[in-house]
């Protein structure tokens, strides 16, 4: 497998370099030079395959001969030991539940696969690999759980002060061991900027063997494509299938676009956001205007300049080509809260704020289309406990894994949002 930088198509590396270095030296994101078409017979008979077998087939075709088959199957089996069920909500709207992993968020799929892949590529290296990751909510917990006690790897997680939920913060600040958390006095974009700048700083790159677990790393996107195939297998509808993807940094929808490019028959994608609507605005106007992110109850989507938009533009170099496959919707907090309550009262299903955005966009899409829709429920509602319980006016049960961490002490490193402060802290 060969990959190129979105800033320079002549800057080509192999999978190992792309995974371990995350960001190209020219600040571009890595993209596959080739996204192969799967055998149509595999798609036609997909109901006969387990999730792990689907993941192996997709991965083997995309990675080609980068990893021997036995090693690749081992990586997949260790990474994915939990389900991704499709649950019907109405006669035309279902949800793909992606919160059955250890951190109760969809990012478990990417983080666990990445941890296994990085550990595989770092074998025999005498220097530890230091993972830098910025989180707006769920990434931190998924990376912490996925990389916890992984030999030869240390993890530093940057999260915005006061802008993640209590449970999200507990998941990334209570493990200890090889996991270190930094509380940044700023927003997610500040955290992400610190990570990107660190990769380009000569002193830090000399002192540390740096990599990233954000969705800027191609190893996060590849496994996120697997569950689109799994959802298609479970749905098996004769009607055109549409996926609504609650979107923040747009890695999840980019992974779905990979799946479509590989031959999965998806009619359309919906890019569903909160008021940080730079991509829906682009889809409607053709102009991309990054903004300073605004705080909402769907905090994992509070991103004003999504990194993966660069990858989307590689897949769709023109506005018209992108709008053929992607439609955008966005919603304010009051609308999100109202829909959470309405769906709970009518169906007894508890949406988290991000899932509510996905559900809302499905309803709006159905006003002018007669398709089957699946929205991604990206996190367990308990991760946004105060907002969910207030919206539906009901207490929800906490999973046992969450009950166990709530009384643990947060251990973090408070820092301002300047790169000088972060660099000094790392070097000390």
Image: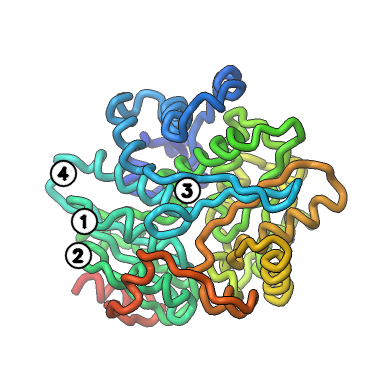
Residue shown at the point (42%, 33%) measured from the top left: 52
Residue shown at the point (51%, 47%) measured from the top left: 7
Q: Separation of disc 1 and disc 3 at Cα?
A: 28 Å
Q: Which mark is residue 177?
A: 2
Q: Which mark is residue 149?
A: 1
Number of other residues with Cα within 10 Å of mark 1, as a class: few under 14, some 14 to 19, many 20 or more? some
Q: Separation of disc 4 and disc 1 at Cα?
A: 17 Å
Number of other residues with Cα within 10 Å of mark 4, as a class: few under 14, some 14 to 19, many 20 or more? few
* CB within 8 Å, label 2 to label 1: yes
Q: Earlier in the sequence, mark 4 or mark 1?
A: 4
Residue under circle 4? 125
What SS does tag 3 mark? loop
The correct choice, above or below, for 262 with respect to 218 in the image is above
Q: Residue furthest left?
A: 126
Asked whether residue 25 is in view, the answer is no
* CB within 8 Å, label 3 to label 2: no
Q: Earlier in the sequence, mark 3 or mark 4?
A: 3
């Amino acid at each position: 497998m060969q990959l190129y930088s979105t800033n320079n198509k002549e800057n080509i590396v192999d999978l190992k370099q792309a995974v371990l270095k995350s960001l190209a030296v020219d600040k571009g994101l890595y993209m596959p030079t080739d996204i192969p078409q799967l055998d149509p017979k595999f798609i036609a008979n997909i109901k006969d395959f387990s999730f792990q077998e689907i993941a192996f087939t997709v991965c083997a075709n995309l990675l080609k001969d980068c990893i021997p088959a036995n090693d690749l199957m081992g990586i997949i089996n260790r990474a994915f030991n939990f389900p991704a069920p499709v649950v019907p909500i109405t006669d035309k709207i279902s949800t793909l539940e992606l919160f059955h992993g250890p951190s109760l968020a969809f990012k478990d799929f990417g983080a666990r696969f990445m941890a296994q892949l990085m550990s595989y590529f770092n074998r025999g290296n005498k220097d530890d690999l230091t993972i830098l990751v910025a989180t707006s909510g769920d990434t931190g917990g998924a990376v912490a759980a996925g990389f916890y006690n992984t030999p030869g790897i240390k993890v530093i997680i940057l999260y915005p002060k006061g802008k993640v939920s209590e449970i999200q913060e507990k998941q990334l600040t209570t493990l200890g061991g090889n996991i270190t958390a930094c509380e940044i006095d700023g927003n997610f974009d500040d955290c992400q900027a610190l990570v990107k700048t660190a990769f380009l700083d000569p002193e830090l790159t000399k002192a540390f063997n740096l990599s990233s677990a954000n969705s800027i790393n191609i190893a996060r996107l590849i496994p996120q494509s697997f569950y689109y195939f799994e959802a298609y297998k479970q749905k098996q509808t004769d009607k055109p299938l549409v996926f609504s993807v609650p979107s923040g940094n747009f890695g999840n929808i980019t992974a779905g676009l990979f799946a479509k490019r590989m031959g999965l028959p998806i009619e359309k994608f919906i890019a569903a956001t909160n008021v940080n609507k730079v991509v829906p605005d682009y889809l409607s106007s053709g102009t991309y205007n990054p903004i300073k992110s605004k705080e909402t109850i769907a905090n994992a989507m509070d991103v004003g300049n999504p990194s993966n938009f660069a990858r989307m533009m590689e897949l769709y170099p023109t506005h018209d080509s992108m709008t053929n496959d992607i439609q955008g919707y966005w919603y304010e907090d009051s609308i999100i809260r109202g829909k959470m309550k309405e769906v709970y009262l009518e169906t007894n299903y508890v949406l988290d704020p991000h899932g509510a955005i996905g559900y809302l966009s499905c309803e709006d899409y159905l006003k002018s289309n007669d398709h089957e829709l699946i929205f991604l429920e990206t996190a367990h509602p308990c991760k946004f406990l105060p907002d969910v319980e207030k919206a539906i006016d009901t207490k929800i049960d906490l999973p046992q894994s969450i009950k166990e961490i709530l009384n643990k002490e947060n251990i973090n490193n408070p820092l301002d949002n300047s790169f000088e402060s972060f660099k000094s802290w790392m070097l000390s």
